[in-house]
Amino acid sequence: MADATESDEAELLPDRPPPDLAGLPEDIRERILAVQEKSGFVPNVFLTFAHRPAEFRAFFAYHDALMEKDSGLSKAEREMIVVTTSAANGCQYCVVAHGAILRIRAKNPLLADQLAINYRKADITARQRAMLEFALKVSQDSASLEAADYQTLQAHGFAQEDVWDIGAVAALFALSNRMANLTGMRPNPEFYTLGRG
Amino acid sequence: MADATESDEAELLPDRPPPDLAGLPEDIRERILAVQEKSGFVPNVFLTFAHRPAEFRAFFAYHDALMEKDSGLSKAEREMIVVTTSAANGCQYCVVAHGAILRIRAKNPLLADQLAINYRKADITARQRAMLEFALKVSQDSASLEAADYQTLQAHGFAQEDVWDIGAVAALFALSNRMANLTGMRPNPEFYTLGRG
Amino acid sequence: MADATESDEAELLPDRPPPDLAGLPEDIRERILAVQEKSGFVPNVFLTFAHRPAEFRAFFAYHDALMEKDSGLSKAEREMIVVTTSAANGCQYCVVAHGAILRIRAKNPLLADQLAINYRKADITARQRAMLEFALKVSQDSASLEAADYQTLQAHGFAQEDVWDIGAVAALFALSNRMANLTGMRPNPEFYTLGRG
Amino acid sequence: MADATESDEAELLPDRPPPDLAGLPEDIRERILAVQEKSGFVPNVFLTFAHRPAEFRAFFAYHDALMEKDSGLSKAEREMIVVTTSAANGCQYCVVAHGAILRIRAKNPLLADQLAINYRKADITARQRAMLEFALKVSQDSASLEAADYQTLQAHGFAQEDVWDIGAVAALFALSNRMANLTGMRPNPEFYTLGRG
Amino acid sequence: MADATESDEAELLPDRPPPDLAGLPEDIRERILAVQEKSGFVPNVFLTFAHRPAEFRAFFAYHDALMEKDSGLSKAEREMIVVTTSAANGCQYCVVAHGAILRIRAKNPLLADQLAINYRKADITARQRAMLEFALKVSQDSASLEAADYQTLQAHGFAQEDVWDIGAVAALFALSNRMANLTGMRPNPEFYTLGRG
Amino acid sequence: MADATESDEAELLPDRPPPDLAGLPEDIRERILAVQEKSGFVPNVFLTFAHRPAEFRAFFAYHDALMEKDSGLSKAEREMIVVTTSAANGCQYCVVAHGAILRIRAKNPLLADQLAINYRKADITARQRAMLEFALKVSQDSASLEAADYQTLQAHGFAQEDVWDIGAVAALFALSNRMANLTGMRPNPEFYTLGRG
């Protein structure tokens, strides 16, 4: 472990350089190369988590379990939860990166910016609005959840497994937003314009 | 997927019965049996997450990566972060269960209750107080983290990897607290008295 | 009056030693000896208030008028209000000391910890939950009380004098919590374990 | 005790008529007549508390112990604390009634209104501003009090007993504000204009 | 532009002396003289804005467009909005100055102080209370406005143009309160007593 | 005035159709045609305010007085204040429309999105960060402004007139954000992509 007393300001957590790709464990290097192949660039979240291989594996396993599976929520709806709750947490990386993914998955160039500023004025259905209000309560004040909140989701046709999905996406990005803010993660420039065409 | 419109109130997420142990994947059943062997009971967090094997594996992998490894923070200090931030999030399960673990790891029967109500009045060192204030900022307002916060930790002798650990424990339990509140997880009665002797 | 500029940090209000029992007015010394006789120790609240005899007498007169009389609320219910509102105010002394009293009066070793972390997850009746929500509004935002709040209590069967009792207990501990935080009052170690058996 | 289910809205706590003076205990009736003799009217706080003689006696004993004694704070300064913290609590009775008392005791017709809206823009000394900031912290967030707050008061020349007085006045009116809001206490019209001449 | 590095503290914005009346543009000087003629003194808001003639003209044009025209809201009701929202913003100038105007326009010496401390305890109609609650939401949390808020106003008989007026008065004084706080505007002493007779 | 009781939900303020251009006063129609000529579309703020010609004129006069003049702040810096404070107020119209203007004026396609989510992570100078922190305090909590806030701006080289400009832009958009949220103003689709190239 580095001796903190010798660190100068430039060595603080938010300014740490990314790890050397060649020195990473095989599985992590492969996942990073695969995403680069597919996207044309390496999203910074991969480079940041690569400092800690065990946490990298756990985080992306959790991410894939929730975001890639079949669900009563469409993939675009899950990204709507990510963008809306990440904006409430002031997470620049998550809003910009997942805003791009949302634009692509929803085939809608405006929705991500609308949700990031004020979901109440976004072009969404009443069912999606109920989904986002529940997700925001999980994200911002989960201690206050009560029976009426679950019943509102039921009344909009969400099944029990959907409720878990809504809450769990909000919970995972509660972690993700904090890690991005903790480590000073910045969005890759590519994300700002993806899907706007 | 169950038809939500047929669900009655008793089937809402917080009241779902635990899954049948026999029907769980081998690795999950083994972990549950191992913890039962060691503790004498199965903490409810294992039963709740067992509804979702992929999330179970990711969550406990993340947990073990942070809470079981060697670190510049003692295991008791990591539990101090869990108890203090979980209290700020009103997570009954996490405060009671990790309060018990903290009493045992710190060999201190009073500390957990002190931290849960007001960490400013707890019997801790100035260094531990700085650790908890940083953890609470990550937990409650990570968007406002700034250079001065990192410098305060440095001034108390925390190394860069320690800062990651402090923030990451707060971030993981941001997720954990929300999952417990979402699913209505309740502490096992055993936790209330463990380590008070 | 002591010259403040000569005081060093150790003389600040929170660190003031308790007064000498022998020098206290007769009535105050007797009350302290009586509580010691009954409990086996002197709760610190008596020693702190003993610095100011007139305030000691007024405080305990107010306390006894509300907490010891017959009421539409059981004594355990009044302690539930104390624990719940004191937790909202971050008062370590009141939560730990009255948590012990609640465990004893309710003959329930778990309830106090449940209420202190999140009353919404506690094992209480709907009527008790309404009582605590009213008490918390008096405690945290009394300016916003409105007709609907009183009507909710009526609908749960609370009489007018009960409403006064609920609000007055919350109001008295608004004072008590602030005095404990102001003077740095710490719970006696005995309180942490009383009533857990 | 009245049967709550038979009460109609007009009988709710805030609308209860004052008790009959003739039926009050001797000591309480005498105090009320004395204040009427001196002021020309009976402030409503006396009539409200008269519904509960034991609480009446405790409240005014506490009040007199803090507000009438000799102190390192002038009587006007103690009223400044009352007006400022009561405004923060939205207590109409306390701000209007004690605003009048402050105008008279400070011989200043403007100060009470200034403090009630924004103490930062009031015509007070730096020492008095430090006093009010400490009082507001006791009133609004006593759990966060820390050594630096006491040291700021020391630096402005406040002695240890003065610090107790500042905090205790804020604490007593934390109770008083809540009782006024709970019972719907309204300021007597006379208070609005007293001391403005 | 003045060289900021040469400014001393006395030259900070809040302490800037008013501009010389003789040097002001004709139209501004005339408006100031007219108000002095009518009121017997020059309210400080005119002197502060006179530092910036273009902003002076725009501000008073906006003010007159909303506050002087015929409307579904009486002039007193518009002043009720000003006093209530300005108190929520801690604007000493606006509460004291418009409190005086409200006393005069409503021919009620008590209403302004009631609204400034707690509008829920003021002597107003249910319709006026709905008006103030909508105005406060515009003032304090306009992002959360939703259909139900407009429907509540409709249910109290407010027409669409009335809703604009309520919101626009709250919005204009959102600006005005901030300019007063920014520039350290203080109420003229005359305002404190006007309309109390 | 329309009879509110006959209105149906579609006639609520947020859903009102824009006024007929031909029926507008000459000066307002000309300004609208000029902006259309220059931009290729009519920003919705012009159509909304056109419902109220006197308020239209006052608003744009105020806007031009602050946003178009020479100042110690560049035009891009003034737009930075607009975007940052409008995001804090959840004003979708202002963030998206002025985000576009900021991208163009700063010749920076990323800055607006960075500021809208978290100004602390934006690529700006320390001086600009101080400017934004002052602007946010004016916008969100102007009652708490104090000498230290002005001195911080001075220390970054801002002159007295610059301080007025920073605060006044924040104050004008406090009004503008509320009018946009009140009237349900939506950003024109063109704004989302302008200046991203």
Image (cartoon, coloured by chain):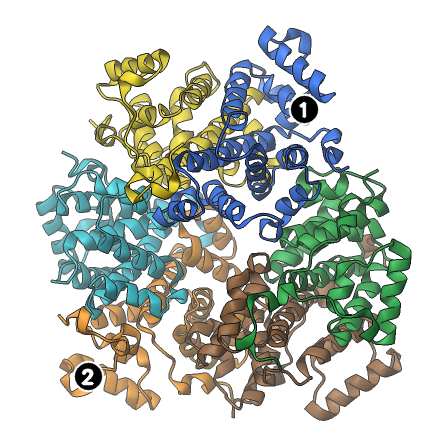
Chain colours: A yellow, B blue, C green, D brown, E orange, F cyan
The number of numbered discs placed on residues in the rendered structure image is: 2
| Placement of F16 over or under A168, stated as above or below | below
Q: Which residue is mark 2?
A: E29
Q: CA distance from mark 2 to mark 1?
A: 78 Å
> Chain for mark 2?
E
| Quadrant in the picture for residue B192 | top right
Q: Quadrant of the N terminus of chain D?
A: bottom right
Packing grade of label 1 (10 A; few <14, some 14-19, many >=20) is many
Residue F81 coordinates in the image, percent (x, y): 25, 54
Query: What residue lies at 55% left-to-right and 41% top-to-bottom?
Result: B85
Residue that badge 1 annotates: B43
Which numbered circle lies on residue D146?
Answer: none
Proximity of marks 2 and 1: CB atoms separated by less than 8 Å: no
Residue at (57, 73) in percent of width and height: C7
- The picture places residue B67, in percent across and down from the top left corner, at 54, 28
**Amino acid marked by disc 1:** Pro
Q: Pinpoint residue D131: horizontal percent, then vertical percent.
A: 53, 74
User: Is F157 situated left or right of C35 in this image?
Assistant: left
Is residue F6 among what the camera can see? yes
Q: Chain of mark 1?
A: B
Identify the amino acid type marked 2: Arg
Helix, strand or loop for disc 1: loop
Q: Is residue D118 left or right of residue D168?
A: left
Residue A152, visible in the rendered structure:
no
Q: Determine the secondary structure under disc 2.
A: helix
- Labels 2 and 1 share a subunit: no
Q: Quadrant of residue F175?
A: bottom left
